[in-house]
Amino acid sequence: MALAALTAVALTGLTGLTPAAANAPGSPGTPAAPVAVFTEDFENGQGAQPTLLTDYTGAGPVHQTYTADPAWLRNCNGYLTSLDAPTTEPAGAGCGSGAWSIVKNLASALGTWSGAADPAANHAVTAYTQADPGGGKVQLQTAEPIPLPAANRFLTFSVDVAATSCYTNAPLLSFYLLDGQTALPTSTAPINACANPGSVVGGVSVGTYASNGSVLFSGTSAGIRLINDQASGNGNDGAFDNVRLLDATPQLDLGFSPATRPVGAPATLTFTLTNTSELAAKNGWSFTTALPSGLRLTDDATTTTCGNGSLTAGAGNSVAVGGDLAAGQASCTVTAHVTSTDPGTYQLCAGAVTDRVGIDPPGCASVTFTAPVFDARSNAARVYSPLLPLGPIAPSAHSCTTAPGSDSHGLVSTGLGTLGSLGVISTDASGTVGPDGTRTAAAHASIAHLSLLGGLISADAVDTSAQARSVLTSSGPGPVSLQGTSTLTGLRVAGVAVGANPPPNTTVGLPLVGSVVLNEQTAIGGGKGITVNALHVTLLTGVQLTLGTATAALLSSTDTCPAV
């Protein structure tokens, strides 16, 4: 078992501590109260008559009984009493003149400190030493183990203590956790109410004290031992009440920052361990988490504010995390960088956190990685006419999705009415993701044996392509590079031969008819895409005809799609 180095301190914030609800995720960095898994208030079945500690039985369901060294059961020691007790000490108590009334006041002072409805009726285990008890002797010990709700938990103690005669030797109390016959210390410095009072009530120093350390306990039951290290009977006068065995296991929280990132870019995954409010040291906590499929560590750059904090990549997609919380430390963090080349939302929850030792499970956290949206489209022809629009003919599209894919279509021939005819047609559109994460949107259209306007425009074949490409970098997708081409084989306009690769947006007039733009290229989507028309015919009648259209764009998730 891991054992923290401790000192005992007065904790006024633990006054009147009662069993708390289990820790819950969602407030990283804000300590919650430890959970009291066992509390003894020494009130079960008690009235005005004092009871020797060894004759007392605690409340159910544990019904705990207690033992102590004989030195702490005689000479005015070891009685459960209250201010309401008779003025005469029990027979054989050994208090002597005036001591019994002081003993009763100790119990009342603790009742006032804890906020009891009637402090005079509050019972505590008292001591007014009338002889040297000897140092390091047991003042209280449980007779039977206390069942624990779970193993691998951090356990510590708190107790209400009163002390008087502080001008001389003070009681020095130290708690031990019992694992069978093995005593595990929970502090390296004893509780000294004289030196560290939470308050002074009627001349009595009082306070609630907890260790600033804990024991990482692997068992399912434990005992309590309280030792008084003060050997002298000169002074050494006090009382204790409300002994609490505390589950002080820290809370694990998960978080991603920022919550949305482009694919390939790093997001910070933060594991936050939040202490419980007594701020005892918690040494040796650990856990393993399996990252969601598709999410991976980007590098070995781990940062931590936890003592001995570590994060180690394991088999598969697992990550092992461990470390310490120092005494007085409210929380600590271990961070790593994660990324994904696949767009989507990745959620990490308690079910993925296994091999938990000394932590409470987290809630869920998620991160979303966004990728450029494919917009690839093509068609063979389209007629824009106020009276009789036509097409698009043989359209293909892989558009408005981040997933790779493709589409293609073809026709043997088609007519355009009075505008002309087209031979064999093929179109295709695709979105691909390379092994290195490069994303490419591409579209293509081809037409064989084109004849328009009674032969005014003709070609053996036209081929058009458009491409938008983004290379994945360590900070996300790079800039979109665009490419568009048109190849016009055997093109003749008004009987004049035209080269196969005219410059973009070459305009040729058609006297008394209109005009035609060759290799028309237009940027779309705010510069993230391109549309290429092999031919764009505009007639004086207002009719427009596009042939061999290819569009390719890589858009952001907030861009309009299809792009314009």
Image: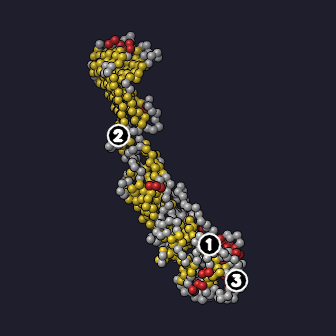
Q: Please say if 386 is above or below 438.
A: above
Mark 1: amino acid: Ala
Residue 101 image label: 3
Whether residue 341 appears in this view of the structure is yes
Q: Which comes sooner in the sequence, label 3 or label 2?
A: 3
Q: Which comes sooner in the sequence, label 1 or label 2?
A: 1
Q: Please say if 437 is above or below 188.
A: above
Q: Nearer the viewer, residue 42 or 281?
A: 42
Give how far across and how far down residue 69 sits, in percent.
Answer: 55, 84
Q: Nearer the viewer, residue 144 or 329?
A: 144
Secondary structure of the residue carrying tag 1 is loop
Q: Nearer the viewer, residue 91 or 129?
A: 91
* Type of colouring: secondary structure
> Residue at 65% across / 88% down in the picture?
92
Mark 2: amino acid: Val
Q: Which comes sooner in the sequence, label 1 or label 3?
A: 1
Secondary structure of the residue carrying tag 2 is strand
The CA span between labels 3 and 2 is 86 Å
Give how far across and how far down residue 60 sits, in percent.
Answer: 60, 71
Residue hosting label 1: 59
Residue hosting label 2: 433
Is the C terminus in the top left, top right, bottom left or bottom right quadrant?
A: top left
The CA span between labels 1 and 3 is 27 Å
> Residue at 62% across / 68% down in the picture?
15
Q: Please say if 175 is above or below 135.
A: above
Whether residue 520 appears in this view of the structure is no
> Residue at 63% across / 82% down in the picture?
52
Q: Residues within 10 Å of mark 2 (few under 14, many from 20)?
A: many
Mark 3: amino acid: Ser
The answer to whether residue 101 is left or right of residue 318 is right
**Camera-side mark, 1 or 2:** 1
